Image (cartoon, grey):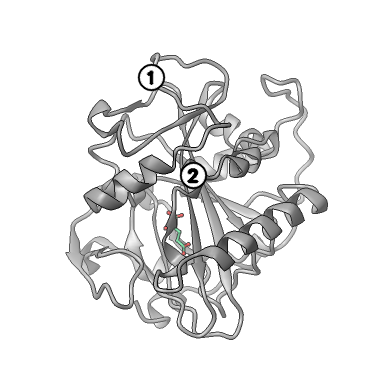
Amino acid sequence: MAKKDFCRAPCDTTLLMPTLVSSPTSPSTNNRPMRLSQEEVEHYRREGYVIPRGPVFSEEKFQALFDHFERKLAEWPKDKRPEAMDTPHFGDPKLNEWALAPEVVDLVEPLLGPDIILFSTHFICKPKGDGRRVPWHEDSAYWRKLLEPMEVATVWLALDPSTTKNGCMYVIPRSHNTGKMGFSDYENVDVNTSVFETEIVKADRRDELAVPCELQPNHCSLHDARTQHGSPPNTSDIRRCGWTLRFIPASTRLNPEYADRQIMYLARGRNLLNQELADPTRDYSHVIEERKRRGFKAH
Ligand SMILES: O=C(O)CCC(=O)C(=O)O
């Protein structure tokens, strides 16, 4: 999509300011203070997204993730788009040390409850100059055959600065609870310039309401799977990389027909539905291969 499609709404500058709310004190199930304030939880539920205060990891832990990603990117085939590093953790158990870290899981526990499963991850790394746009979409539309009920919270963790200049993600507030509520109509887009193949039709979007999720490295936004979101191309001279970490409550079921292409890991609490779960210390590269063989793009 053209940059202007995202920029009609004035930037909600309050999002970029530290939130002046007192630190929450109610403990999570781990007896650590909850990571999101009550106001932030309410914002997420009402608006379909939230930008929490503060960094996610310690500086050292974030730097180790950043370095790990840089090594992966250096090994990534030159003929493959860097935006397409989907489910990298299936074949790289080291990544689970960050994906399943309490710093991350604490963020989603107040949204999903105490029993949590890591459903998926994706590095969406838009190179400088010709980084591709992410068409307007709802994650739920891609996962409608996979998950029931459709309850998914995504942590979008910035590895690079992510701003309106280098193609940050935009969200359409309240779209998760209005219109077609996560299941809009889609049309095909040019796959040579877009990360995904389809986009929500204009009639089902309110682009003028779009809010940019500007983030510094090691900061994150959270969005509901039904929230409409996307991002313009990166024509700037700064790379824009984010890692999406997608969590479901353990009460959401993965359609077993997809078990050969989609594996999940217990992040916290109980495996309520006794679903098949993977071992986060094991290498499941064969699942990535199976996805490729079937041309399976879950998102
Ligand atoms: O990285 C982006 O610009 C879009 C991210 C996205 O589509 C997602 O987190 O579901």
Q: Position of residue 65 (x, y in %)?
A: 68, 53
Q: Amino acid at mark 2?
A: Gly
Q: Would residue 181 be found to the left or right of residue 155 on screen?
A: left
Mark 2–mark 1 distance (CA, rounded to whole Å): 21 Å
The residue where tag 1 is placed is: 275
Residue at (21%, 65%) from the top-left corner?
201
Asked if the residue at label 2 sits under 8 Å from ligand 1, the reply is no
Q: Nearer the viewer, residue 121 or 77?
A: 77
The residue where tag 2 is placed is: 91
Q: Position of residue 171 (x, y in %)?
A: 45, 60
Q: Is residue 231 visible?
A: yes
Would you place residue 215 above or below residue 78 in this image?
above
- Residue 299 image label: none
Q: Position of residue 158 (x, y in %)?
A: 62, 60
Instruction: Say which element carries label 1.
Output: loop
Q: Nearer the viewer, residue 9 or 34?
A: 34
Total labels: the figure holds 2
Residue at (64%, 41%) from the top-left corner?
39
Would you place residue 24 above or below residue 205 in this image?
above
Q: Is residue 19 visible?
A: no
Please identify the quadrant where the N terminus is shown. bottom left
Residue 252 sits in which quadrant? top left
Of the image marks 2 and 1, the number of the one nearer the N terminus: 2
Ligand 1 appears in which quadrant? bottom left
Asked if the residue at label 1 sits under 8 Å from ligand 1, the reply is no
Crowding at dot 1, Cα within 10 Å, few <14 / some 14-19 / many 20+, comes out as: some
Residue at (37%, 81%) from the top-left corner?
2
Q: Amino acid at mark 1?
A: Gln
Residue 5 sits in which quadrant? bottom left
Crowding at dot 2, Cα within 10 Å, few <14 / some 14-19 / many 20+, comes out as: some
